[in-house]
Image (spheres, rainbow, N blue to C red):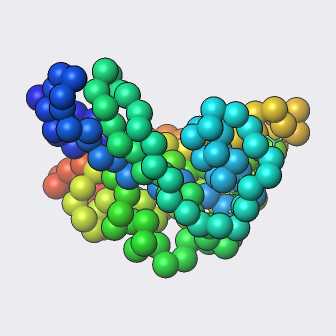
Amino acid sequence: MSSVFGKPRAGSGPHSVPLEVNLAILGRRGAGKSALTVKFLTKRFISEYDPNLEDTYSSEETVDHQPVHLRVMDTADLDTPRNCERYLNWAHAFLVVYSVDSRASFEGSSSYLELLALHAKETQRGYPALLLGNKLDMAQYRFTHTTGHACKTQSYAWLPLPPQPDSPSNNP
Ligand SMILES: Nc1nc2c(ncn2[C@@H]2O[C@H](COP(=O)(O)OP(=O)(O)OP(=O)(O)O)[C@@H](O)[C@H]2O)c(=O)[nH]1
C-alpha cells in the first residue's frame, strides 16, 4: 500500500475516496504565507487580500494520479507561535515559510521548527515539515546565511521521520 503524507490511501482507481490532508502554513509575520496560499490556490500572485485573516481553504488536488482533498490553514501568529494546539492537533503536514530577504524572518522560523520537533517527540509521530524560502524575486536582497542556514537545514532534516526509541534526542 502506498501513502501520501504518511497516511494510507483510501483506495485506488477512478472511484477511490479522496485522501484528506490538512496542511498548516507557519512562519513569522510578513514571510508571505497568505500570498503563497492564495498563489497556490489560484495559480497566480494576488496582492489584494486580507493578510491578517487566519483562514482555512480547501482544494481538490491530484497526487500520483490519486484525488486528494487538501485543506490549507493560513495561520496568523504574531511574531512567535501562539495557541499552537489549533494547528498542531489539526495538521498532517507543515510548511514553515520565511522570506529570503529577511534575517529576522529566517531566524523566526527556528521557533516553529523547534515547536514541530517537540510536537513530534511528544506525540511519538513523524510529521512531514518543509522549510521554504519565499520571495525569491527579492533574492538580490538575500541576507547572508552561509553556515547558519546550512546548519539549521541539517538540524531539522530528520523532522519527517518518526522518532526512534534509541535516538539520542529521545534520551536527554
Ligand atoms: N516581492 C514579493 N513580495 C511578496 C511575495 N509574497 C508576499 N509578498 C509581500 O509580502 C508582504 C507580506 O505578505 P503576506 O502574505 O501578507 O505575509 P504573511 O506571512 O501572511 O503575514 P501575516 O499575515 O502578517 O502573518 C505583502 O506585502 C506581500 O505582497 C513574493 O513572493 N515576492
Q: Is residue 84 visible?
A: yes
Q: Nearer the viewer, residue 6 or 51?
A: 51
Q: For residue 61, which quarter of the picture? A: top left
Q: Residue at x 76, y 43 (%)?
A: 46
Q: For this view, does 148 lie left or right of residue 159?
A: right
What residue do we see at 20% from left, 50% from top? 164
- The image quadrant where one finds the N terminus is top left
How far across and how far down the image is residue 92, in percent? Answer: 34, 52
Q: x%, y% of residue 63?
A: 36, 27
**Quarter assignment of residue 38:** top right
Residue plotted at (55% across, 63% down): 55
Q: Answer whether residue 146 is visible to the viewer in this image.
A: no
User: Could you tell whether 139 is left or right of 1 in the image?
Assistant: right
21 and 158: which one is in front? Answer: 21
Question: Relative to the observer, which residue lies in front, 83 or 165?
Answer: 83
Task: Give x and y (percent) for residue 48.
Answer: 79, 52
Q: Quadrant of residue 132?
A: top right
Q: Number of labelled discs?
A: 0
Above or below, comparing residue 14 to residue 21 in the picture: above
Q: Tell whether 16 sits left or right of 72.
A: left
For this view, does 142 lie left or right of residue 57? right
Which residue is found at the position 54% from the left and 77% from the top? 82
Which residue occupies the extreme front position in the image? 15
Q: Nearer the viewer, residue 81 or 1?
A: 1
From the top left corner, tell me how far across and down residue 107 is, in percent. 67, 57
Seen from this angle, which residue lies furthest right?
A: 141
Task: Work out which quarter of the rendered image holds the C terminus and state it.
Answer: bottom left
Residue that protrudes farthest toward the bottom in the picture: 83
